[in-house]
Image (cartoon, rainbow, N blue to C red):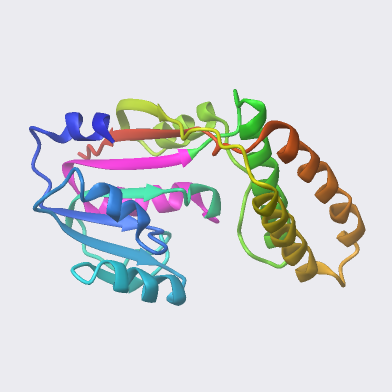
Amino acid sequence: MEQLKQFFQDKTVNTLLDVGTGTGSFITVLKETFNNTKFTGIDPDEESLKEATKIHPDVKFSNMTGEQLDFPDSTFDAASISMAMHHLPDVQQTFNEMKRVVKPGGWLIVNELFSDNLNPAQEVHKSMHHFKSTIDRLNGVCHNETYTRAEILEQVEKAGLEICTTFNQEKDRTEPTSEEISERKDKLAEMLSQIKDKPEYQKLKKQIPEIEKALKQHGFQMATRVLVIAAVKRD
């Protein structure tokens, strides 16, 4: 992520907190930029943290939510959240907590996919993501639909953060094989089975052939992500 490296090339980040770290995939990306940084990752899912510990044995992981960070004020030089904003029950509370534990003059890094200005292959990804998010919500799991790019920036600014820079990231479009199409269809069916006793089952079932048709026609491409770097300033 060259733009991230360029921004931080002359800045010191000794400690960084990754919120909603999952299996630590964004820490893998961050390590390419921050060579001598001590990382901490938090997530409410124990199973994900077990996997993250295997991948990053040098990182301290803790079971914790972003809305209530169990760290003193001004603990870290920076904090990040990647592909987790749409999972937050309270975005502003999480951003406020991240601000609190970051030292004044430090930074917040937000990496999030967005829902607007997508090509047809990316719309396939969005439809699959929204299918999963609907099922999660029906099962009581906080999983919101994707924000627009403007909404993401609005949430960052609403938290009283000063946006320093933003840039978009895109992954290449792929032409899925028949096996991959079948695998994705099976995954959708597996997700659907989680709500087989709910009244929304039949309505969502009808979406699977539509998604499969779009996948065959347009291929698959991850929705574009925006990376935001914002400065933490407190009185």
Q: Is residue 54 left or right of residue 156?
A: left
Point out residue 93 in the picture as x, y percentages from the top left corner.
44, 52
Q: Residue furthest top?
A: 117
Give the quarter of the image for residue 27.
bottom left
Point out residue 186 in the picture as x, y percentages from the top left corner.
73, 61
Task: Say which residue appears at 34% left-offset and 54% top-offset.
Answer: 97
Q: Is residue 9 above or below residue 188?
A: above
Task: Say which residue appears at 24% left-offset and 39% top-offset.
Answer: 232
Quarter of the image where the N terminus is located: top left
Q: Is residue 102 magenta?
A: yes
Q: Is residue 169 magenta?
A: no
Q: Is residue 42 left or right of residue 181?
A: left
Q: Is residue 179 above or below residue 11?
A: below
Q: Is residue 4 left or right of residue 180?
A: left
Magenta segment, which residues?
88-112
Point out residue 76 in the picture as x, y percentages from the top left corner.
18, 54
